[in-house]
Image (tube, grey):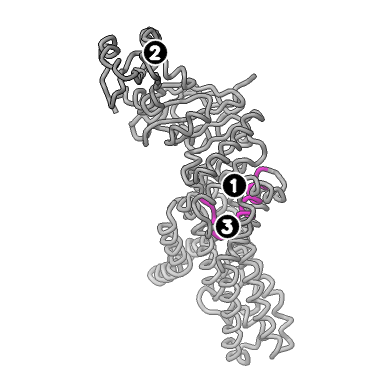
Amino acid sequence: MNRILATARSEFRISLRNRWVAIAVILMGLFSLVLSAVGSAPTGELGGDRLSVTVASLTSLTVYLVPLLALLMSFDAVAGEVERGTLPLLLTYPVARVEILLGKFLAHLAVLTIAVAVGFVLAAAAAFRTDTTSVEGLPALWRLGWSSILLGATFLGAGYALSSLARRPSGAAGLAMGLWLGAVVLYDLGLLSAVVADGDGWFTTTAFPFALLANPADAFRLYNLAASQATSAAAGVSGAANAIPIWQSAASVLLWPIVALAFATAAFRKVTP
Amino acid sequence: MTSTLKISALTKAFAGVTVLDRVSLDIAPGQRIALLGHNGAGKSTMMKIILGLIPFDSGTVEVCGNRSGSAPARTQVAYLPENAAFHPALTGQEQIAHYLSLRGESPKLAMNLLERVGLHEAARRRIGTYSKGMRQRVGLAQALIGKPRLLVLDEPTSGLDPVSRRDFYALLDGLATEGASILLSSHALTEVEARTDRILILSGGRMVAFGALGDLRRTADLPVAVHVTPRNGYATEIAAALPGAIRVNGDLRLNCPQDEKLPILAQIASFGDKVADIEVVPPSLEAIYSHFSQRDGQ
């Protein structure tokens, strides 16, 4: 445990010095504020409180931004050590590879948590300034907060796995961007076109819900939209959100970080310095 | 006493090419071994196998009775890579504190260690600003953590100036006296000559020589050079008695096999006052090294 914490401490220090903490916090803070400002327009018609509406917008933001930040922080984790030549020495220490990964994971997750917390607190503050009934939206914001961090954890693990597989930072960066594009952007487009082509066939009725649950980003969106009062305020997969029981999307959100870290550990074990 | 490092019949091939061929080695506590060989002779591969960084094909490698690379073995071994590299964003002190924690020692000892390698003044600067020699010292400092039983040092003095090299070897001598075994590779043969107990020469993955320098000298049986300075006027007389001698600036020089060295010296001594000086030059470590490492036709 001490070795994990020592690694986490070092990694967090490196993230501070590399400006990752600043970049993540500023990005999340800025986007949250912008969304709160833009989100104020449709409040009246939808009838929800200000914060619930903001949470719906934040869900769409988070599903893009948090995986991106997580991948940007993690793609260098193993490949960077290989390139700098620091990995052989580190591996001669009496520290298990899984401990090294967990140390890095804790540090990066802390950075993400700080960024998410700053962003969401700013958004909440902006909502409370104009609408005192925003208290109703707090449970949704809290749910969004911890599920965002779990979403980040999933993509951190995925980033470590890609970093171990690529063994070179340039390759790892390419794979990470590919994963982001695939999982967060193209996956939904693919599903959408499949549903359109299929009509009311087997795919739409049987496979589609599972396809949504199998993608951590979609599961995250489903969970937050289904749980939130503001389902109607969001576009996209909101229809599907009502069809899938909430425990299923919650389970997907909870399980994915573990799966991703297991993948990362297995890939890291295969790296020979 | 049990040996610190025990290697038997270690064999390793990369893509069909044999890099290490049935290498066996036994290092006792306190022994300092120099690992010599051409580039690509298998030195680094052997070190990485001892450290457990890469797998091997057959044979056994044990560190203090534990399989190499196992957790108990790793607690006993310290490593200094050829080009010690660290994260540029950390300071020397932070980096050493991290390594201390990984070995279960107090991170507060970092300053103390950096002082031992003469780096305490730069300890709070980022490693990114360090010179190669300074990084090498950070590497050395981390190798001193926690009284390792075996130190594996890959060309440890390559970036150091002459004074730092001397300090470095003094440090190693101290560690060896305390019972640590040291395995170091080097291209600086004269350095190794004075500072190690045994020399191991690898060539094409095979161990072609292992022993104290004196033993290797005898085994190699390279000719000894004898320089004789005759007194004025006696050069011709002495040269006639020493077949094979050549004149260089009034001196006589000849090479003789090891076993003829003493009879020839006796013969020269019999000239008494006619000889002004005699010098016997044993074969250099370079000559011995090339003798062994060229046996494979390299």
Asked which quadrant contains residue A200, the reply is: bottom left
Residue at (57%, 71%) from the top-left corner?
A24
The spot of residue B209 in percent (x, y) is 42, 21
Q: Which residues are magenta?
A: B85-103
Q: Which residue is mark 1?
A: A98
Q: Amino acid at mark 3?
A: Trp
Residue A256: assigned label: 3
The mark lying in front, picked from 2 and 3, is 2
**Circle nearer the N terminus (1, 3):** 1
Mark 3 — on which chain does it sit? A
- Nearer to us in this view, B78 or B245: B245
Q: Neighbour class for label 3 at 10 Å: few (<14), some, many (≥20)?
A: many
Mark 2 — on which chain does it sit? B
The spot of residue B32 in percent (x, y) is 55, 28
The mark lying in front, picked from 1 and 2, is 2
- Nearer to us in this view, A14 or B195: B195
Q: Amino acid at mark 2?
A: Asp
Residue B273: assigned label: 2
The spot of residue A228 in percent (x, y) is 64, 75
Mark 1 — on which chain does it sit? A
- How far apart are the two marked residues, 2 and 3, measured between alpha carbons? 94 Å
The spot of residue B264 in percent (x, y) is 36, 10
Q: Neighbour class for label 2 at 10 Å: few (<14), some, many (≥20)?
A: few
- Nearer to us in this view, A10 or A111: A10
Is B164 in the magenta? no
- How far apart are the two marked residues, 1 and 2, measured between alpha carbons? 78 Å
Q: Amino acid at mark 1?
A: Val
Which type of secondary structure does the marked residue at label 1 adopt? helix
Residue B275 vertical position relative to residue A139 in the rendered view, above or below: above
For residue A140, say whether it is visible. yes
Residue at (51%, 68%) from the top-left corner?
A68
